[in-house]
């Protein structure tokens, strides 16, 4: 059994988890990151690497994967241990130390735990179409890693939320035609983007609303036609090259649910002033946590990472006083 000693264990390697390494490092606190995925970046890398993000300060626009890469570069001075393809399964509270066991039986000893697990373990909600798995990763995709694949192609996008609408707008710039399918007349996405979507109907986008998915047909994993039906069971066949269903994610906190931490609608409740959960020395930051007025934004998670890091200093270094300094004064700390 591999053993690791650290100050803080960070569960999750998304943007908020990675930035926690930086904030802790600036305070001289060592950290170890564990993620069940095979690459860092969380949902940004696994589901939306090509998606543009517009609300990161100083970046008018930055792709999700690029943000992950820059955050990874930012934490290099602190040389964190990063463990991938492993899930934290069990935690044991031994006096002032947590003993943590992963799915690969790696044993980690830490004084505090930061849960930065985003939506928890996640996977796409799949449409109820028979044999759709035969087309997955060939002509049916639940996330987009290289949008150039869809250049000059016929694309069907299904869903009514932000992801479906955002990608329809983005891919309309390069696709031959987009068929936008939703089972209801009203879309749940941001109103301004819904307006943009309707404007695209004058160009290369066709709204197929309200219609439900019915059948998929093709050969060797390559889709040829997608069949949809309206509320009266009238069917329509659409010729497409690719099908992109965006029905959201199925989320699961996994073993975290069994750690005796107070939950609110499957999200961890924290004290906003400290980001502490109901269990001592366990913090939750990013989308996995909630408190009154919580905004689910990456930059909110960055702020929570800083808050949790400063609060846990007195736990990790109980005999030291924390003298706050701006990074413009102290520069980059070295552990």
Image (cartoon, rainbow, N blue to C red):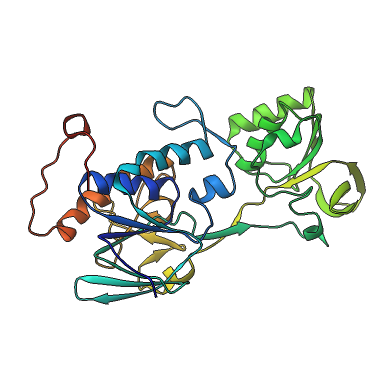
Q: Residue at coordinates 39% horizontally, 47% vertically from top-left?
A: 18
Compared to residue 168, the image places residue 20 above or below, namely below
On the rendered structure, is 181 left or right of 106?
right
Res. 164 image quadrant: top right
Question: Residue 173: where, in percent of width, then height?
Answer: 71, 26
Q: From the image, which quarter does the N terminus lie in? A: bottom left
Compared to residue 296, the image places residue 165 above or below, namely above
| Of residues 38 and 239, the one drawn nearer to the viewer in this rendering | 38
Compared to residue 148, the image places residue 226 above or below, namely below
Q: Residue at coordinates 26% horizontally, 49% vertically from top-left?
A: 24
Question: Residue 151: where, in percent of width, then height?
Answer: 76, 31
Question: Residue 223: where, in percent of width, then height?
Answer: 86, 48
Q: Residue furthest front?
A: 2
Res. 10 image quadrant: bottom left
| Of residues 93 and 108, the one drawn nearer to the viewer in this rendering | 108
Question: Residue 330: where, in percent of width, then height?
Answer: 17, 34
Q: Is residue 300 at least partly visible in the picture? A: yes
On the rendered structure, is 319 left or right of 205?
left
Res. 202 image quadrant: top right
Q: Is residue 129 at least partly visible in the picture? A: no
| Of residues 234 and 290, the one drawn nearer to the viewer in this rendering | 290
On the rendered structure, is 23 left or right of 268?
left
């Amino acid at each position: 059994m591999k053993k690791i000693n650290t100050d803080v264990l960070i569960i999750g390697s998304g943007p908020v988890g990675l930035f926690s390494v930086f904030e802790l490092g600036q305070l001289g606190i060592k950290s170890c990151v564990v993620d069940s995925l095979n690459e860092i970046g969380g949902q940004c890398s696994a589901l939306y690497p090509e998606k543009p993000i517009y609300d990161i300060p100083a970046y008018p626009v930055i792709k999700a994967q690029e943000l992950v890469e820059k955050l990874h570069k930012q934490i290099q001075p602190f040389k964190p241990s990063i463990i991938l393809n492993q899930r934290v399964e069990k935690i044991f509270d031994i006096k002032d130390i947590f003993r943590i066991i992963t799915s690969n039986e790696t044993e980690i000893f830490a004084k505090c735990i930061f849960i930065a697990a985003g939506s928890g373990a996640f996977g796409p909600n799949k449409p109820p179409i028979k044999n759709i798995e035969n087309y997955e990763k060939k002509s049916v995709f639940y996330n987009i890693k290289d949008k150039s694949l869809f250049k000059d192609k016929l694309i069907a996008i299904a869903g009514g939320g932000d992801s479906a609408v955002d990608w329809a707008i983005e891919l309309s710039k390069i696709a031959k035609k987009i068929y936008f399918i939703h089972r209801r007349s009203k879309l749940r996405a941001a109103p301004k983007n819904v307006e943009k979507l309707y404007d695209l109907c004058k160009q290369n986008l066709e709204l197929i609303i309200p219609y439900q998915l019915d059948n998929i047909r093709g050969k060797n994993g390559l889709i040829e036609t997608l069949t949809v039906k309206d509320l009266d069971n009238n069917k329509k066949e659409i010729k497409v090259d690719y099908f992109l269903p965006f029905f959201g994610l199925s989320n699961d906190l996994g073993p975290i649910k069994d750690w005796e931490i107070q939950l609110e609608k499957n999200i961890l409740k924290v004290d906003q002033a400290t980001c502490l959960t109901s269990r001592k020395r366990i913090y939750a930051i990013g989308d996995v946590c909630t408190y009154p007025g919580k905004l689910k934004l990456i930059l909110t998670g960055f702020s929570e990472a800083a808050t949790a890091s400063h609060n846990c200093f007195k736990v990790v270094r109980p005999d030291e006083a924390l003298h706050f300094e701006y990074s413009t004064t102290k520069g980059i700390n070295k552990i």
